[in-house]
């Protein structure tokens, strides 16, 4: 070991020894020197930052001096983590286990475990690897190393099974898996069947180059089947001919399925034409035939071809797939074909009919038939639930909107079991390390029971950690605790822009709650940012129309900036749609061009409830329903009585 490393280890060891002596002095009631007495929080924060700099500068002596002052600072475990990580490869498994045990409540726990296991694998210390990681780990790379370690210990059967499982993947496999897979291959355990099965997985990815690579690994006899895979990828319209000409085998049946599905994606009309020959060719079971027919029928919801419509409806009439039948109902709703709606609702399985959604629509259909008394009785059965269809029923019956609400009576001391974690989170929030705070919170919530999650949600709310409170209610499924689920977050900004835009505060808050759950730094996979989830391009265009300077996409994480531009964009959507929130919320989520297309399709034939149900995107339909409901919730929280829909929205033709 180098002199520098020896000095670093000695100084850190001395720091640990001082911690032990300090604790012993306290326990014996012995006085402590002024240098070890409690410092102010500001002093500790400054020392913490200096200690991090000392780590960066590799200044062991300075780090040791500073670390010695920080025993009681909440974020010190992060210093210890960084320090421990620096020399992780010099640690024994026992030392790592001890560290992990000491900091088991910290979110970096899995990181240390993963990194050390990876190090042992790279160092080929296989016995130690399995002692440290005795069970199958998560992640492809570690799993490959785990099974390779098993192989090195002579546990071949388990290693080969692991290799076979890892091999079955439709995309590339990590390079770290090569030793295991090569050993599996050289041992003669990888067969043509394994390669062909993987080719079928790759087929669905439309990756001809990879298929060709796999085909070259087949034996001469196996390549006959491999060539068929590639041929059908290039010409899926040959699927019926292939099905009829090929022997009925498990492989040929699976290849026919993926080829037929590809044909349906490429040319659905041709897929319908080839359906019977394809099914007969490989002697599929009745259930498999229906499954493939359902797949094709799902791609025919917008067709205007009379023959295809007839074929589609015959398929759906025999189907038990709820989502497919629901799509058919919505297609009929979109066309205002109420006779068809009635037919298809009746074809829903009994369990689906009992949901609030389809119970509501059964009542609606009875009302359309003039059976108002029967309809009202069903509507009445839905009342009082925390559900869009319950509130819709109350709206139709012109009854008050009611739903269960619970209030937490817990206080701060109820969270003592998690005190160390909460102190860390509190300090992380205070020093604006919000990402780390959210990570700590998510780690803390893992495995919590509802009563435990309620304590944490209450604590978060008391500290105005709005997003964390919402996350705790989700983790604990605390749906009736509205003060925790719907905090009055950033209300000053919303009140300000309520006056500026002539928009209800409740409406803006409802939309923000749906978009980000009050995470100011939320970022979607497609790049939408902040509380009201604005795309940078939309924000830039909105800022231009509002004659405001746009300071770039990172400015959208600032609540004031985000609410200014988000409320501005929402106002534009409302102006565009005559203040109709249904259209405007749908446009905010799916884009105004799609809403225009849906309006053209329905052509003013629908009422508001039918239009919402007929929205073809599950996400957008749920989004509109949620924001309307959240508007009601926030109104009640602020002592207002707001209907689910305004009179204008109810009376409009959609």
Image (tube, helix red, strand yellow):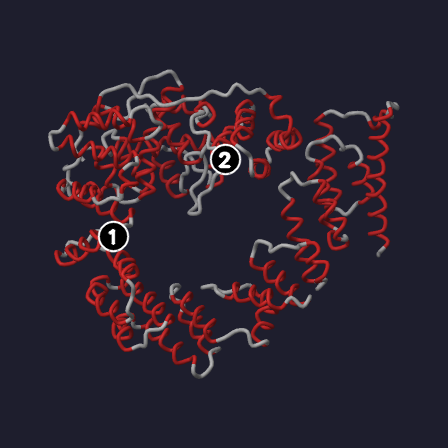
SS category of the residue bearing label 2: helix
Q: Residue at x 52, y 18 (%)?
A: 409
Which of the 4 quarters of the picture holds residue 599? Answer: top left
Badge 1 local density, few (<14 within 10 Å), some, or many (20+)?
some
The image shows residue 485, relative to residue 141, as above or below, that is: above
Q: Which mark is residue 260?
A: none
The answer to which of 115 and 577 lies nearer the viewer is 115
Which of the 4 quarters of the picture holds residue 508? Answer: top left
Q: Point out residue 564 in the picture as x, y percentages from the top left corner.
A: 41, 30
Badge 2 or badge 1: first in the primary sequence = 1
The image shows residue 141, relative to residue 26, as above or below, that is: below
The answer to which of 277 and 8 lies nearer the viewer is 277
Give the position of the C terminus as an image quadrant: top left
Question: What is the total number of numbered labels drawn onto the structure image?
Answer: 2
Residue, disc 1: 319
Q: Is residue 296 left or right of residue 68?
A: left
Q: Point out residue 247 in the picture as x, y percentages from the top left corner.
A: 32, 77
Residue, disc 2: 475
Q: Is residue 560 left or right of residue 643?
A: right
Would you say the residues marked 2 and 1 are in contact, meaning their CB atoms lie under 8 Å apart?
no
Badge 2 local density, few (<14 within 10 Å), some, or many (20+)?
some
Which of the 4 quarters of the picture holds residue 160? Answer: bottom right
SS category of the residue bearing label 1: loop
Most extreme residue toward the top is: 639
Residue 550 visible? The answer is: yes
């Amino acid at each position: 070991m180098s002199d520098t490393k020896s000095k670093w280890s000695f100084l850190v060891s001395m720091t640990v020894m001082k911690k032990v002596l300090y604790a012993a002095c306290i326990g014996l009631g012995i006085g402590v020197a002024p240098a070890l007495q409690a410092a102010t929080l500001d002093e500790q924060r400054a020392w913490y930052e200096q200690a991090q700099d000392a780590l960066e500068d590799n200044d062991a002596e300075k780090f040791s001096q500073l670390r010695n002052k920080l025993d009681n600072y909440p974020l010190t475990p992060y210093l210890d983590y960084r320090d421990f990580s620096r020399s992780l490869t010099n640690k024994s498994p026992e030392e790592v286990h001890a560290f992990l045990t000491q900091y088991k409540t910290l979110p970096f726990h899995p990181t240390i475990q993963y990194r050390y296991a990876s190090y042992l694998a790279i160092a080929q210390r296989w016995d130690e690897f399995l002692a440290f990681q005795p069970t199958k780990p998560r992640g492809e790379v570690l799993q490959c190393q785990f099974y390779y370690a098993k192989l090195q210990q002579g546990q071949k059967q388990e290693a080969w099974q692991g290799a076979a499982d890892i091999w079955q993947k439709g995309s590339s496999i990590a390079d770290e898996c090569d030793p295991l897979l090569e050993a599996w291959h050289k041992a003669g355990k990888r067969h043509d069947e394994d390669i062909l099965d993987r080719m079928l997985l790759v087929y669905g990815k439309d990756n001809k180059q990879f298929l060709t690579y796999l085909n070259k690994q087949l034996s001469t006899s196996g390549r006959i089947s491999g060539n068929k895979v590639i041929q059908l990828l290039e010409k899926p319209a040959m699927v019926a001919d292939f099905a009829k000409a090929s022997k009925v085998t498990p492989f040929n049946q699976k290849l026919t399925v993926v080829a037929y599905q590809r044909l349906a994606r490429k040319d659905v009309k041709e897929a319908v034409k080839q359906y019977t020959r394809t099914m007969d060719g490989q002697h599929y079971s009745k259930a498999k035939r229906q499954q493939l027919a359902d797949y094709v029928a799902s791609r025919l919801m917008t067709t205007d071809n009379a023959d295809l419509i007839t074929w589609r409806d015959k398929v759906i009439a025999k189907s038990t797939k709820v989502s497919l039948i629901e799509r058919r109902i919505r297609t009929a709703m979109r066309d205002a074909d109420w006779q068809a709606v009635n037919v298809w609702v009746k074809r829903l399985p009994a369990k689906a009919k009992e949901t609030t959604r389809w119970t509501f629509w059964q009542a609606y259909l009875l009302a359309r038939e003039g059976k108002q008394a029967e309809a009202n009785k069903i509507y009445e059965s839905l009342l009082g639930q925390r559900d869009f269809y319950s509130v819709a029923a109350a709206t139709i019956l012109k009854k008050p909107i009611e739903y269960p609400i619970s209030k937490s009576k817990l206080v701060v001391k109820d969270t003592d079991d998690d005190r160390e974690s909460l102190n860390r989170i509190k300090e992380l929030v205070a020093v604006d390390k919000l990402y780390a705070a959210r990570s700590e919170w998510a780690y803390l919530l893992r495995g919590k029971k509802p009563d435990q999650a309620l304590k944490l949600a209450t604590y978060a709310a008391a500290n105005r950690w709005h997003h964390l409170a919402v996350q705790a209610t989700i983790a604990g499924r605390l749906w009736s605790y509205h003060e925790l689920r719907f905090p009055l977050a950033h209300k000053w900004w919303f009140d300000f822009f309520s006056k500026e835009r002539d928009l209800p505060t409740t409406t803006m808050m409802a939309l923000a709650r749906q978009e980000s759950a009050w995470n100011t730094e939320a970022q979607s996979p497609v790049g939408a940012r902040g509380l009201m989830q604005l795309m940078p391009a939309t924000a830039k265009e909105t800022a231009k129309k509002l004659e405001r300077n746009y300071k770039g996409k990172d400015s959208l994480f600032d609540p004031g900036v985000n609410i200014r531009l988000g409320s501005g964009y929402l106002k534009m959507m409302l102006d565009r749609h005559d203040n109709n929130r249904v259209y405007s919320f749908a446009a905010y989520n799916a884009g105004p061009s799609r809403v225009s297309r849906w309006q053209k399709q329905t052509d003013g034939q629908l009422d508001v409830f039918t239009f919402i149900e007929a929205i073809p995107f599950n996400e957008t339909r749920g989004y509109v329903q949620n924001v309307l409901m959240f508007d009601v919730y926030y109104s009640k929280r602020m002592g207002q009585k707001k209907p689910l829909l305004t009179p204008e929205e109810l009376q409009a033709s959609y």
